[in-house]
């Protein structure tokens, strides 16, 4: 993914989260995680991404 | 519970018998090789299994009829195989409704249709629905035909004491208290086991928060015998509903209570009627219906640390309580009963060493722990215990509306027979096999001629082989020899060559298998499987 693509994805994620009403945002993100995990097709990499996402949440 | 004005056993469709307390006199025999406490499905199965080995037993039950209500309604294929070995399967086949398919719905839309493994090489369907009182009635009828089984109704065990060569029970019956002596005791007295309490034992494990009401209604509803699971339906947001068809136009409606929903209120008749009416609207039924019976339960995983306490063995719910998802309570109870039944029979007949009895708890408790692992997964999906489980469950269901892969997460893990891989009486596997049931696993069925492989098995150990010379070496033993054609469908499903052999236990599990079998190996395996000394002859 090029830096430009990443920027586009970043923007689309932000817009999609804003487009989802507050009570459904968690559900939306969880569905997205399941879809991406299914596409990734690599449980070990998913586990390392989970750990990476959980790191430094209180920074 | 039943609607106001109807007694506990006042059913819309089933006539409960009344059993008198036994009349004892000077000639009464107050001893037996085996005493069985509890004449429910598990106790009766144990008695029939023992009778099949020629062993007399006496059952004690504190009730005067069968258990009230339909309770456990799903009987698995492996249980039908047990019932066939007991010679009791016919009325079950006649009355029950076999099924293969389940459908899951999310907010009214179907997200999954699953089929349990089935094929023409299986004699029985994966599952059958039948009300528990019929299960008890059919087993009771089989027991009544046996001279080796006596049932003492309205008879409660009030004390139990160990003696040198057996156990002394104190029996309290109407106007009569007496002592009964047995070499062995089987405690089949259910989740609130008196024997367990009298022995000072406690179930260990955890409770899930989920609570369910189960209600039976009688109605002329036109839908095939397919298990329906309704997730997050309009009539019960956030909850899960199961719908099962039973014989006699009886339908089981099973719905989850919400967090904080008051249990006492939930089981009031008006509340149950309103909840059921809402479910019927949800599934599109608008005709007449009658409320038959209802009850409430919670999803638990509890078990004894050891299913044996000296000369007392715990079988069924007295030993373990499992969540109902996956229908493993009754089916595992029946497997417990057959497991201890044949082993005790063989020991009492002098054909097995007493050490064989030590294999009961590891084999059957292992099965319970396996159930816990699977049922806990199902329970977490049906009744998510925390915010994280709830979110991911909802995400999976919601995603399943458009992506079938996510619907597979709603597939309940149904009962499959447990493999006794760590049992002391099961052989290590022969690494030469590429397929087929491993030692400890239940034998897989196959078509043989006009019938099935299971039909060929004997009441004791059976040898499946393909070499007439090997078969001939066991012609004069009490092993039932099943000589099959090499290359036949059965040989293929067993992964067997012309020189292979399988030794099958009385309960249909594989005791050992050899890719290239020698008679000596088979004899040694039989000695191990019956815990007999190595120098004993077969």
Image (cartoon, grey):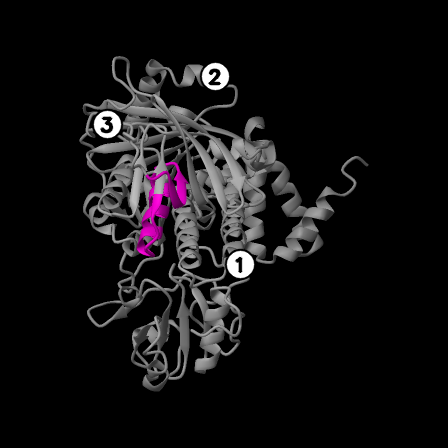
Which residue has dot 3 on it? B18
Q: Nearer the viewer, mark 2 or mark 1?
A: 1
Q: To which chain does the residue with label 3 belong?
A: B
Magenta stretch contains residue B479? no
* Image quadrant containing the C terminus of chain B: bottom left
Residue at 41%, 80% (x, y): give it.
B500
Which region shows up in magenta?
B29-57
Work out which residue is located at the far bottom of the displayed protein and give it: B469
On the question of residue B457 being in view, the answer is yes
The disc placed on residue B355 is 1
Q: Which mark is residue B496?
A: none
Neighbours of disc 3 within 10 Å: few (<14), some (14-19), many (20+) = few
Query: CB under 8 Å between callouts 2 and 1?
Result: no
**Marks 2 and 1, how far apart at CA:** 50 Å
In the rendered image, residue B474, in percent from the top left (x then y), is placed at 36, 78
Q: CA distance from mark 2 to mark 3?
A: 35 Å
Q: Which residue of the protein is positioned furthest toward the front in this rendering?
A: B26
Q: Earlier in the sequence, mark 3 or mark 1?
A: 3
Q: Is residue B458 left or right of residue B537?
A: left
- Kindly check if marks 2 and 3 are in contact, taking CB atoms under 8 A apart as contact: no
């Amino acid at each position: 993914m090029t830096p430009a693509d990443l920027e586009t994805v970043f923007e689309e994620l932000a817009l999609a989260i804003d487009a989802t009403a507050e009570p459904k945002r968690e559900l939306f993100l969880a569905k997205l995680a399941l879809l991406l995990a299914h596409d990734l097709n690599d449980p070990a990499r998913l586990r390392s991404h989970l750990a990476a996402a959980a790191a430094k949440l209180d920074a | 519970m039943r609607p106001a004005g109807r007694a506990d056993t006042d059913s819309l469709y089933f006539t409960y018998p009344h059993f008198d307390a036994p009349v004892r006199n000077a000639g009464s025999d107050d001893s037996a090789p085996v005493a069985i406490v509890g004449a429910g499905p598990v106790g009766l199965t144990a008695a029939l299994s023992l009778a099949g080995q020629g062993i007399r037993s006496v059952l004690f039950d504190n009730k005067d009829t069968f258990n009230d209500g339909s309770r456990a309604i799903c009987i698995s294929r492996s249980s039908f195989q047990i019932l066939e070995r007991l010679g009791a399967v016919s009325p079950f086949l006649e009355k029950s409704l076999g099924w293969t398919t389940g459908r899951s719905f999310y907010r009214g839309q179907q997200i999954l249709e699953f089929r349990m493994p089935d094929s023409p090489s299986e004699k029985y369907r994966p599952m059958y629905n039948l009300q528990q009182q019929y299960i008890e009635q059919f087993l009771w009828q089989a027991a009544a035909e046996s001279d080796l089984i006596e049932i003492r109704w309205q008879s409660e065990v009030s004390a139990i004491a160990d003696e040198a060569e057996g156990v002394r029970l104190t029996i309290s019956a109407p106007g009569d208290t007496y002592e009964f002596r047995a070499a062995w005791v089987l405690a089949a007295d259910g989740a609130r086991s008196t024997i367990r309490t009298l022995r000072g034992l406690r179930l260990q494990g955890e409770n899930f928060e989920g609570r369910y009401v189960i209600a039976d209604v009688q109605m002329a509803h036109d839908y095939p015998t397919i298990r329906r699971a309704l997730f997050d339906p309009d009539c019960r947001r956030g909850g899960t509903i199961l719908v099962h068809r039973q014989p006699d136009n009886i339908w089981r409606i099973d719905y989850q209570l919400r967090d904080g929903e008051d249990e006492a209120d939930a089981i009031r008749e008006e509340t149950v009627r309103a909840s059921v009416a809402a479910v019927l609207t949800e599934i599109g039924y608008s005709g007449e219906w009658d409320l038959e019976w209802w009850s409430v339960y919670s999803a638990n995983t509890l078990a004894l640390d050891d299913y044996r306490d000296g000369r007392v063995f715990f079988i069924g719910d007295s030993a373990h309580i499992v969540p109902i998802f996956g229908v493993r309570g009754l089916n595992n109870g029946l497997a417990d009963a057959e497991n201890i039944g044949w082993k005790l029979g063989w020991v009492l007949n002098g054909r097995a060493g007493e050490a064989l009895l030590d294999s009961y708890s590891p084999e059957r408790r292992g099965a319970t722990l396996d159930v816990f692992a699977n049922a806990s997964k199902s329970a977490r999906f049906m009744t998510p215990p925390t915010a994280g489980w709830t979110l991911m469950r909802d995400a999976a269901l919601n995603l399943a509306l458009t992506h079938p892969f996510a619907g597979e997460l709603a597939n309940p893990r149904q009962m499959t027979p447990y493999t006794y891989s760590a049992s002391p009486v099961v052989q290590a596997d022969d690494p030469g096999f590429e397929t087929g049931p491993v030692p400890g696993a239940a034998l897989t069925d196959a078509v043989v001629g006009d019938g099935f492989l299971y039909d060929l098995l004997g009441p004791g150990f059976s040898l499946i082989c393909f070499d007439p010379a090997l078969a001939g070496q066991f012609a004069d033993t009490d092993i039932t020899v099943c000589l099959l054609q090499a290359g036949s469908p059965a040989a293929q499903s067993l992964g067997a060559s012309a020189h292979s052999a399988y030794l099958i236990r009385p309960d249909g599990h594989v005791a050992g298998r050899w890719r290239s079998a020698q008679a000596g190996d088979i004899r040694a395996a039989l000695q191990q499987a019956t815990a007999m000394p190595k120098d004993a002859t077969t």
